[in-house]
């Protein structure tokens, strides 16, 4: 970044606060943060917003997508309220925000996903984005064979493997190795969730890596970081996702994710 005065960092942080909170008076919002939290509030404005959020390499829309995913995975519901508003202000649609938590149930469990969806629906309703008839659309009613047919190409793309010629053989091998978890992963995570069209595969890779990074799931990151590249996420965007992870989940989780990213890049360079 080169040398930067505090005034310059603060100006960058205030600009992010302006768009995140949709306020014409970000100085007052920053002052409240500092008055209520002391140095912690100062660092929230100067580091989290001024240093991290202001970095180039990823849009504010995508950074909101990442932050909402991290907060949902960590069940940080109070902070989630502010960032759901910020996500809408940064260009995410209500459908896209809700879809984050639909996808999250496969990676952080139903309790956290349902709690995050409840808070999100409350915020969206306050912003005028409640469903017209008070009801959200249900999932498609798919048969088991339909779910398995849908899962194959997407799973092959994510993992860099081949489309399965014989799904029965593949499922039998997974069940022998992992028990019912293997087949549920195929049928539910890849057959039901990943093939929904409310978010692109590229966005889904960003949110999954955010879930996994926040939860410290290093073995799964070794699968999903390469998968993100296959879905069109760039090296710079993944680096920004990990930098954002440092501010919202902590540096240890970001350091571990960085190691895995670098290992993948080294393997590709050979």
Image (cartoon, helix red, strand yellow):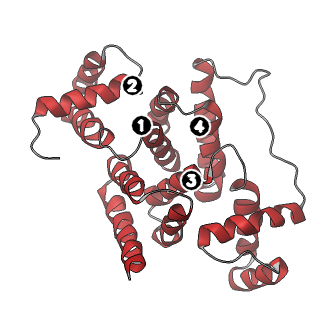
Q: Sequence order check: which comes first, mark 3 or mark 1?
A: 1
Q: Sequence order check: which comes first, mark 4 or mark 2?
A: 2
Q: Judge depth for marks 4 and 1 and give the one in front.
A: 1
- Of 245 and 261, which appears nearest the observer? 261
Query: Which label is found at residue 19?
Result: 2
**Placement of 204 over or under 53, stated as above or below:** below
- Mark 1–mark 2 Cα distance, whole angstroms, equals 9 Å
Q: Is residue 152 left or right of residue 11?
A: right
Q: Judge depth for marks 4 and 3 and give the one in front.
A: 3
Q: Position of residue 47 (x, y in %)?
A: 24, 40
Residue at image location 42% in from the left, 20% down from the top: 22
- Of 240 and 189, which appears nearest the observer? 240
Residue at image location 22% in from the left, 35% down from the top: 46
- Mark 3–mark 2 Cα distance, whole angstroms, equals 24 Å
- Mark 4–mark 1 Cα distance, whole angstroms, equals 14 Å
Mark 3 is surrounded, within 10 Å at the Cα level, by few (under 14), some (14 to 19) or many (20 or more) other residues, namely some
Q: Are marks 1 and 2 in contact (CB under 8 Å)?
A: yes
Query: Which label is found at residue 186?
Result: none
- Mark 4–mark 3 Cα distance, whole angstroms, equals 15 Å
Q: Sequence order check: which comes first, mark 4 or mark 3?
A: 4
Q: Is residue 125 left or right of residue 211?
A: right
Q: Identify residue for label 1.
A: 60
Q: Identify residue for label 3.
A: 202
Q: Sequence order check: which comes first, mark 3 or mark 2?
A: 2
Q: Identify residue for label 4.
A: 97
Q: How many marks?
A: 4
**Placement of 185 over or under 192, stated as above or below:** below
Q: Is residue 37 visible?
A: no
Q: Are marks 4 and 3 in contact (CB under 8 Å)?
A: no
């Amino acid at each position: 970044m080169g040398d930067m005065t505090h005034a310059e960092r603060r100006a960058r942080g205030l600009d992010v606060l302006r768009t995140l909170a949709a306020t014409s008076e970000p100085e007052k919002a920053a002052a409240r943060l500092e008055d209520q939290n002391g140095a912690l509030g100062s660092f929230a404005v100067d580091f989290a917003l001024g240093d991290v959020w202001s970095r180039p390499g990823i849009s504010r829309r995508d950074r909101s997508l990442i932050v909402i995913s991290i907060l949902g995975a960590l069940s940080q519901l109070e902070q989630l309220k502010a960032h759901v508003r910020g996500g809408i202000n940064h260009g995410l649609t209500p459908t896209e925000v809700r879809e984050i938590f639909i996808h999250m149930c496969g990676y952080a469990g139903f309790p956290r996903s349902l709690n995050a969806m409840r808070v999100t629906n409350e915020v969206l309703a306050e912003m005028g984005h409640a469903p017209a008839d008070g009801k959200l659309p249900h999932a498609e009613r798919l048969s088991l064979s339909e779910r398995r047919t849908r899962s194959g190409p997407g799973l092959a793309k994510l993992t860099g493997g081949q489309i399965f010629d014989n799904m029965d053989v593949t499922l039998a091998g997974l069940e022998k190795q992992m028990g019912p978890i293997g087949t549920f992963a195929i049928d539910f995570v890849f057959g039901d969730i990943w093939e929904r069209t409310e978010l692109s595969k590229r966005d889904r890779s960003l949110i999954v890596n955010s879930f996994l990074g926040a939860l410290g799931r290093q073995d799964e990151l070794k699968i999903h970081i390469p998968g993100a590249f296959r879905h069109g996420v760039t090296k710079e965007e993944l680096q920004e996702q990990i930098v954002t992870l440092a501010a919202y989940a902590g540096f240890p989780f970001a350091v571990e994710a960085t190691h895995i990213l670098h290992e993948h890049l080294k393997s590709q360079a050979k």
